[in-house]
Image (cartoon, helix red, strand yellow):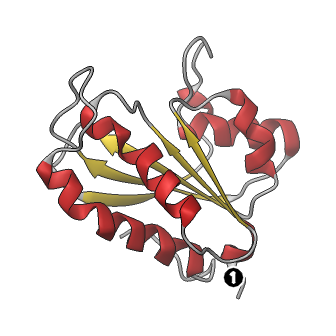
């Protein structure tokens, strides 16, 4: 069994000025300040861009953290991701995590184990710097879910 914590990448993304959309970068920033296993790298971003591909290539496991506009506010979901070339964008503004994985696979032949962990939000208004009550309440649970994914052997990890 491979312990992926030794070579994992966490990418939290979202807009810090759109309420619950800030959950990704906030979680990444908090995790970056915590004690994590050696080899775990954390990146906080507003959007996903192609310059993340080299970081993904060097990882055995990648965990993306984002807000979701659908679902019950505060609901945490984890889904396993696979490269998906049909998600290709114009690269004009931002990329989908599956698109980054497709670039990683196509350009470097690398296919790290990848997950998207989301928290359903309720408030995405501009110029709003606070998480909604429902999202703020599950913030500690989100951090636990990410740490669980980091620590899990790769053959035992699956969507929750």
Left or right? Give the position of 52 relative to 117: right
Would you place residue 67 above or below residue 150 in this image? above
Q: In which quarter of the image is residue 9?
A: bottom right
Q: Residue placed farthest to the right in the image?
A: 108
**Residue 33 in the image, given as x and y percentages of width and height:** 55, 63
The residue at which mark 1 appears reads as 3
Would you place residue 28 above or below residue 36 in this image? above
Question: Residue sitting at 56 percent across and 27 percent down?
Answer: 95
Question: Residue sitting at 35 percent across and 64 percent down?
Answer: 142
Left or right? Give the position of 153 relative to 22: right
Q: How crowded is mark 1: few (under 14 residues within 10 Å), some or many (20 or more)?
A: some
**Residue 48 in the image, given as x and y percentages of width and height:** 58, 32
**Residue 136 in the image, given as x and y percentages of width and height:** 22, 55
Comparing 40 with 54, the one in front is 40
Q: In which quarter of the image is residue 93?
A: top right
Comparing 25 with 49, the one in front is 25
Would you place residue 8 above or below residue 16 in this image? below
Is residue 116 visible to the viewer in this orientation of the structure? Answer: no
Q: What element carries label 1?
A: loop
Comparing 42 with 121, the one in front is 42
Comparing 46 with 130, the one in front is 130
Would you place residue 92 above or below residue 79 in this image? above
Is residue 128 visible to the viewer in this orientation of the structure? Answer: yes
Question: Residue sitting at 73 percent across and 64 percent down?
Answer: 60
**Which image quadrant: the N terminus?**
bottom right
Left or right? Give the position of 5 relative to 64: right
Question: Residue sitting at 65 percent across and 37 percent down?
Answer: 100
């Amino acid at each position: 069994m491979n312990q992926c914590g030794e070579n994992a990448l966490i990418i939290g993304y979202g807009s810090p000025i759109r309420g619950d959309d800030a959950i990704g970068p906030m979680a990444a920033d908090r995790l970056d300040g915590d004690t994590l296993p050696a080899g775990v790298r954390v990146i906080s971003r507003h959007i996903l861009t192609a310059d993340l591909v080299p970081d993904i290539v060097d990882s055995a496991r990648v965990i993306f953290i984002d807000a979701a506009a659908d679902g019950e506010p505060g609901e945490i979901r984890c889904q396993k991701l696979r490269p998906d070339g049909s998600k290709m964008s114009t690269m004009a503004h931002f990329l989908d995590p599956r698109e980054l994985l497709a670039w990683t696979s196509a350009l470097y032949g690398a296919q790290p184990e990848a997950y998207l962990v989301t928290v359903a939000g309720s408030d995405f208004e501009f110029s709003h710097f606070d998480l909604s009550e429902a999202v703020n309440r599950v913030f500690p649970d989100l951090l636990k879910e990410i740490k669980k994914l980091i620590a899990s052997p790769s053959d035992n990890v699956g969507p929750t």
